[in-house]
Image: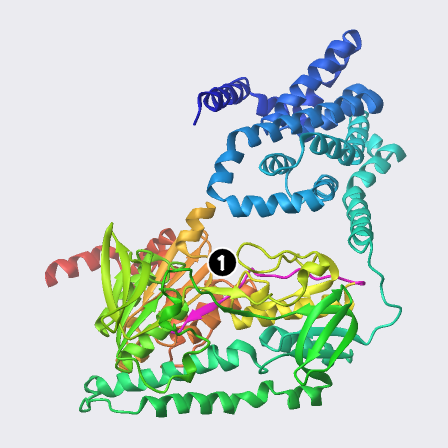
């Protein structure tokens, strides 16, 4: 940090310290202003110019340094200076203060962020250049975030100072007037009878209605602005057009058909998307075969003779294909046509916000229009730009299922859910698996104690874990494929036969023509969406992997409901997507299932919590099945049974988690789970026992001591009991 920045930081720290030491946060309160109202008004009447200037200077300092009290000062401006002088003083001072905060953020942080996140900052700047002024005006009129955050955030962009100051001043004027006017009425309240006066009631009604009015006005202006230059069709071929036949697209089309809307689903390849064809269904079928192999290999756990596992890998993969074929009718074009969906085989690209150009797989081209369009094109495995990797003809979760010969030495890149699931499956089927992960542990999004259980099982099953290894280069040496990794500054050579890449996923947006309608993808490849799942245009939506932030089949289906319903009925009512209770499962063995906060996330967000643990080694059903390992961990607020998050590590973790997910969704605490009858012996009893652990830790000890004395008294005299104990001793 250079000397100028250091000096500025010292000055800011000194001013903030003075503000706190002189009790500024206590002075700038509504109660304090009302308490000294008469004396302040008397002084102001004699020193109006000095008072206005002094007020403005303090307001500038408070706003520039993001100190608390700006709202109270706005009300005070109206209370002590009236509408005219109060509005002038507050509007000018707030604009100057906001501009100074903007400049401070730019001076202190922008260069650092530009160096560290050059691509992200560049994309932000392009967006600000295109829509920045309107976006800023929207935030000022309908503040989704506090103004001090807007000041700091905008300082990190390339917005021009003149534009920032002018837009801020104009956009803040309506809100400033409402608050200043409310302040003029506050100063007139001397008795309870004054509260029902017309002027005061009107001012407070305006104060309450202003956000709604501003939101409506901004929405109307935004709609007119975003559609400027586009000619809306007079009639439409469909109510809803859906691009992509994966989980998100299927659910969107299903909902539209269910409410009798005319809907078309455009899919260029196979219906069912990744989940059916290359993801959830085939991977779980492979994992089940691997589990069966492991059971046979360790049959001695169940009093049987362990046997060497022999089998044809081709036969295993044929079973996987059979499983996919058996599930396929659920997602078939025939089924959806019966539901009322027009299923089109082809590709689609945007012509306008209401029109798509569709190239059928047979070569025909046509243009289709709809009131609303849903983009649900899913994702694909990401391929890192590692030298030599493409020459290895790498496997991914997409092309893996065409294998007929099992790799003898399989190198797996990635320690996330997909990489871990497939690494474990191939290891149990007999491959020598080397799993390379750049981080220091597997499943980095989970807590360390969760990752540790999985790590131990992986090593027990023979996986060669290379944590903290970053793949740097691939090559063929003397006819052998090798990978070179960096570990603790050293170059590590790893020979292998085939490599499976599982380092994340990228959204499918190529060929959609999003640039024609002014939509740019985010740095992670997904498209930007609003809380109602719309992107840029109120009638164009995205859901599933192409939208993020979760890349789960059930998350895609969840988002699809909002996209379809808002697309069909959004002009009457819009629903905001709710991610508060989002469960997921990693299907390793043991399974890892979580919903809500982890410990790491709770700490990062500063949320107070306490942990309740229950070991599955204590569960009768787990013991009976010789699967008595793993645990349940539940996070709750201190002293309360409300569930903040839960994780289950063990067999059937996904099924056990469902009870905690249901409880979180409907606001049920651990006491309700404890009071529910669970059949014995089942895996789900573990949820009740975890709730019991919480109850035991929060038992009312004072009442229990009184009860102990009561029971002793009811048995007879305590002195007699004491004598009996002495004789026994």
Which of these two is toward me, 310 or 349? 349
The residue shown at (46%, 92%) is 322
Residue 308 vertical placement versus 422 (above, below): below
Residue 237, magenta (yes or no): no
User: Is 607 left, or right, of 219 in this rendering?
Assistant: left
| Spot occupied by residue 166 in the image (x, y as percentages of width and height) | 75, 31
| SS assignment for the magenta stretch, majority | loop
| Spot occupied by residue 328 in the image (x, y as percentages of width and height) | 55, 88
Residue 584, magenta (yes or no): yes
Work out whether residue 592 can be spotted: no
Residue 245 figure quarter: bottom right
Pointer 1 residue: 642
Residue 601 vertical placement versus 442 (above, below): above
Mark 1, secondary structure of its residue: loop
| Spot occupied by residue 191 in the image (x, y as percentages of width and height) | 80, 28
Work out whether residue 354 can be spotted: yes
User: How many labels, in total?
Assistant: 1
Residue 283 figure quarter: bottom left
| Spot occupied by residue 189 in the image (x, y as percentages of width and height) | 80, 27
Direction top: furthest residue:
46
Which of these two is toward me, 68 or 462? 462
Which of these two is toward me, 134 or 485? 485
Name the quarter where the N terminus is drawn: top left
User: Is 99 left, or right, of 277 in this rendering?
Assistant: right
Q: Which residues are magenta?
A: 571-587
Residue 718 figure quarter: bottom left
Which of these two is toward me, 331 or 50? 331
Name the quarter where the C terminus is drawn: bottom left
């Amino acid at each position: 940090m250079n000397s100028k920045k250091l000096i500025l930081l010292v000055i800011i720290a000194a001013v903030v310290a003075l503000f706190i030491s002189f009790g500024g946060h206590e002075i700038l309160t509504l109660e304090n202003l009302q308490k000294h109202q008469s004396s302040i008004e008397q002084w102001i009447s004699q020193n109006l110019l000095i008072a206005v200037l002094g007020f403005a200077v303090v307001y500038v300092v408070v706003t520039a340094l993001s100190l608390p009290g700006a709202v109270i000062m706005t009300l005070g401006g109206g209370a002590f200076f009236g509408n005219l002088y109060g509005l002038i003083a507050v509007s000018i001072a707030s604009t100057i203060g906001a501009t100074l905060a903007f400049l401070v953020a730019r001076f202190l942080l922008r260069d650092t962020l530009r160096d560290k996140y050059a691509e992200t900052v560049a994309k932000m700047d392009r967006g600000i250049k295109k829509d920045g002024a309107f976006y800023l005006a929207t935030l000022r009129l309908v503040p989704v975030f506090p103004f001090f955050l807007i000041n700091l955030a905008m300082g990190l962009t390339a917005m021009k100072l003149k534009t920032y100051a002018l837009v801020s001043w104009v956009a803040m004027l309506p809100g400033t007037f409402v608050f200043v006017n409310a302040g003029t009425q506050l100063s007139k309240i001397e008795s309870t009878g004054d509260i029902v006066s017309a002027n005061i009631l009107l001012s407070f009604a305006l104060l309450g209605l202003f956000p709604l009015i501003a939101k409506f006005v901004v929405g109307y202006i935004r709609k007119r602005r975003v559609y400027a230059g586009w000619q809306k069709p007079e009639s439409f071929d469909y109510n809803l057009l859906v691009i992509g036949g994966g989980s998100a697209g299927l659910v969107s089309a299903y909902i539209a058909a269910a409410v009798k809307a005319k809907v078309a689903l455009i899919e260029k390849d196979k219906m069912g998307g990744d989940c059916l064809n290359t993801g959830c269904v085939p991977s779980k079928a492979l994992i089940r075969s691997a589990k069966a192999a492991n059971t046979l290999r360790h049959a001695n756990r169940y009093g049987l003779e362990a046997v060497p596992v022999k089998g044809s890998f081709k036969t295993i993969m044929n079973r996987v294909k059979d499983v996919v074929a058996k599930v396929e009718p659920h997602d078939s074009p025939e089924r959806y046509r019966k539901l009322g969906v027009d299923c089109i085989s082809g590709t689609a690209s945007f012509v306008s916000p209401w029109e798509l150009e569709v190239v059928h797989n047979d070569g025909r081209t046509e243009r289709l229009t709809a009131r609303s369009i849903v983009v649900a094109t899913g994702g694909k495995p990401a391929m890192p730009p590692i030298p030599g990797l493409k020459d290895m003809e790498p496997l991914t979760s997409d092309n893996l299922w065409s294998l007929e010969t099992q790799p003898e030495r399989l190198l797996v890149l990635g320690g996330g859910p997909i990489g871990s699931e497939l690494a474990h499956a191939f290891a149990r089927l007999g491959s020598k698996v080397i799993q390379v992960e750049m981080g220091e542990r597997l499943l980095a999004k989970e807590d360390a104690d969760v990752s540790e259980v999985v790590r131990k099982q992986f090593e027990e099953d023979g996986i060669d874990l290379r944590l903290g290894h970053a793949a740097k280069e691939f090559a063929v040496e003397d006819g052998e494929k090798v990978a070179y990794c960096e570990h603790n500054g050293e170059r590590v050579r790893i020979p292998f036969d085939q490599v499976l890449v599982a380092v994340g996923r990228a959204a499918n947006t190529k060929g959609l023509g999003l640039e024609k309608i002014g939509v740019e993808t985010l740095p992670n490849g997904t498209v930007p969406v609003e809380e109602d799942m719309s992107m840029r245009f109120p009638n164009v939506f995205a859901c599933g992997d192409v939208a993020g932030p979760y890349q789960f089949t059930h998350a895609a289906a969840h988002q699809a409901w909002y996209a379809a319903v808002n697309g069909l009925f959004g002009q009457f009512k819009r629903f905001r997507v709710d991610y508060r209770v989002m469960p997921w499962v990693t299907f390793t063995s043991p399974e890892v299932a979580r919903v809500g906060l982890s410990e790491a996330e709770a700490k990062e967000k500063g949320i107070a919590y306490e942990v309740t643990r229950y070991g599955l080694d204590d569960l009768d059903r787990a013991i009976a099945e010789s699967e008595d390992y793993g645990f349940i961990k539940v996070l709750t607020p201190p002293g309360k049974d409300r569930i903040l998050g839960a994780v289950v590590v063990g067999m059937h973790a996904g099924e056990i988690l469902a009870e905690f997910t249901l409880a979180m969704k409907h606001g049920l605490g651990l006491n309700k789970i404890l009071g529910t009858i669970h059949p014995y012996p089942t895996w789900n009893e573990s949820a009740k026992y975890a709730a019991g652990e919480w109850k035991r830790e929060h038992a009312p000890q004072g009442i229990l001591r009184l009860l102990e004395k009561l029971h002793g008294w009811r048995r007879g005299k305590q002195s007699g009991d004491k004598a009996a104990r002495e004789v026994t001793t």
